[in-house]
Structure formats: C-alpha cells, structure tokens
Image (cartoon, rainbow, N blue to C red):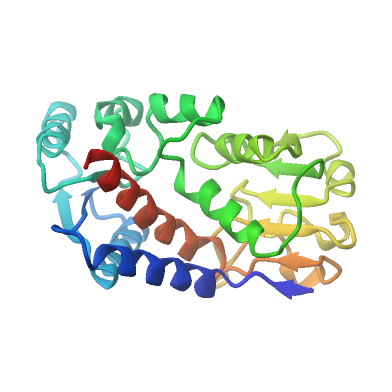
Amino acid sequence: MKIINGNKIAQALRNKIATKVKPLERAPGLAVILVGDDPASAVYVHHKDKACKEVGFYSEKINKPSDITQQALLDEITRLNNDDKIDGILVQLPLPDHLDASLVIETIAPEKDVDGFHSENIGKLMQNQPGLRPCTPKGVMSMLATTGVDLVGKNCVVVGASNIVGRPMAMELLNARATVTICNSKTINLSGKLKNADIVVAAVGRPKMIQGDWIKSGAIVIDVGINRLEDKLVGDVDFDTATHAAWITPVPGGVGPMTIATLLENTLIAYQNRK
C-alpha cells in the first residue's frame, strides 16, 4: 500500500504558483468571508490566509457576525465583485440557517467564483469546458495523476452526492473517460459495488463507514472525509483495514491540503482570465 501524500503534492503546487506570482505586476487577490464563529470554519479560513501569504497573494479575510442579514451579506459580495484588487471570492460554508447559501453563491461573479460552485461554472464542468472547477474534486484529480494510473475505462465509485464534492467529483471522472457509479449512505449493497471499484472516492461524512474488506485488492482509495472521533481525525474509510489497496490518502494530510492549494490555483487562473 502506497500513501498519496497530500501535504507533499500541495506543497509542490504552492511552489509552482509562487513562481508564477513573482513576476506579476500586482498580486492576485483572494477575499474570504467568514460568517459567525464556527471553530472548524475559522481553522479552514486561517489555513487559507496562511497559504495566500506563502505564495504572495493579497489576502482579505472578512469576518461577519452570525446574525448578519441576507441583504447585508449580498451587499458585501457585490462590493467584492466590483473590487479590482480581488480576483477570487470565497464564502466559507456552512452558513447560519437563516442565510440562503445558494443565493449567496449565485451572487458571486462567476469569474471570481474560485470555489467553482456557481451554476455557470458547474455547467462548464458538466460540458467539459474550461472554467473554475470545485476545488476538492479538482484537487483529487491532481492527486490521482501522481499515481500514474490511466483513468480511461476504470470503474470508479463515488460515495456521497453533495454539490460540493460528490456530484462534481463524478463529472471530473466522467470527463476523464472513466466509468462512474455514484452512491450514498443509503445505497443498497454498497459493499458489493465497492468490491468492483478500481477507484473509490469516499465523501459521505461518516467516520470509518467504508470497511477495508469492501475495497478491491489493488484499488486506489481517495478519502475526502474528515471526522472527529475520540479526539482524533479519521476519514470515511477504515484506513487500518484497507492495507490491500494499491494507493490510499491519509486523514489528515491527504485531500485537505490539496483543496486549499487548488483554491490558490483557481485564484491564479481567475487573475489570468481577468487580465
């Protein structure tokens, strides 16, 4: 079993981005809006801010109270849409229940939607056209590329069907000419489907739900899940029992760092497109 080291791959991508940023006439700008004081979200925003500084981006971290009105949040996004220093806008999810996340995402200018969640960017992904693609699935594709395995014709099973990971992940794999099955936590005979999978992407948000004996010998396992269990972080796959996989991502240190590095990559692309 070989480990797909997300920290190492992400560092290489950040180094590449930093090299491209140095000669630019101005630094690409990323604005991150954090609503409320959710500890996990605050940690993610801190990591994104730190990564921006590392590659030489201009970073704007905007904190808003949890009781902000819908209109006030939309007004803030509109302001950033019109700010020439800002090339990418990200609103940290999840949002408080009284806010409409879909409306918030649709208000971000598509060319500044570095999360890749705007319907225009999702539409381009569906049609396999160039555009800003959701960071986690795009990062997963970069990680799969490091294995040297040709995805064409491979049986891929994506467990989880969220708009953030599962659905766009399936489209990325389809665009790579793989054969894709999308499952969820309620799928009948999930273990049977996984036993035929050459590539498994677990993004269901349930700790150690996928058992090692469900995994085909020689498969590639990408674990997107981050779950806190007994004061430690674990994935959606029972890592310790999946020893017969050919490649596997650890949790932590796998997909998480690549998501942030891909966000920076998208911000640089947004800057170049605007230029």
Examine the rendered structure and indicate whether residue 219 appears above or below residue 80. Answer: below
Residue 186: image location, x then y, percent? 73, 35
* Residue found 81% across the figure and 41% down from its top: 153
Closer-to-camera residue (113/191): 113
* Residue found 9% across the figure and 35% down from its top: 79
Closer-to-camera residue (220/238): 220
232 lies left or right of 267: right
Q: Is residue 90 visible?
A: no
257 lies left or right of 22: right
Examine the rendered structure and indicate whether residue 253 appears above or below residue 58. Answer: below
Residue 64: image location, x then y, percent? 15, 47
Q: Quadrant of residue 19?
A: bottom left
* Residue found 41% across the figure and 61% down from its top: 261
98 lies left or right of 209: left
188 lies left or right of 80: right
Residue 239: image location, x then y, percent? 72, 68
Q: Quadrant of residue 180?
A: top right
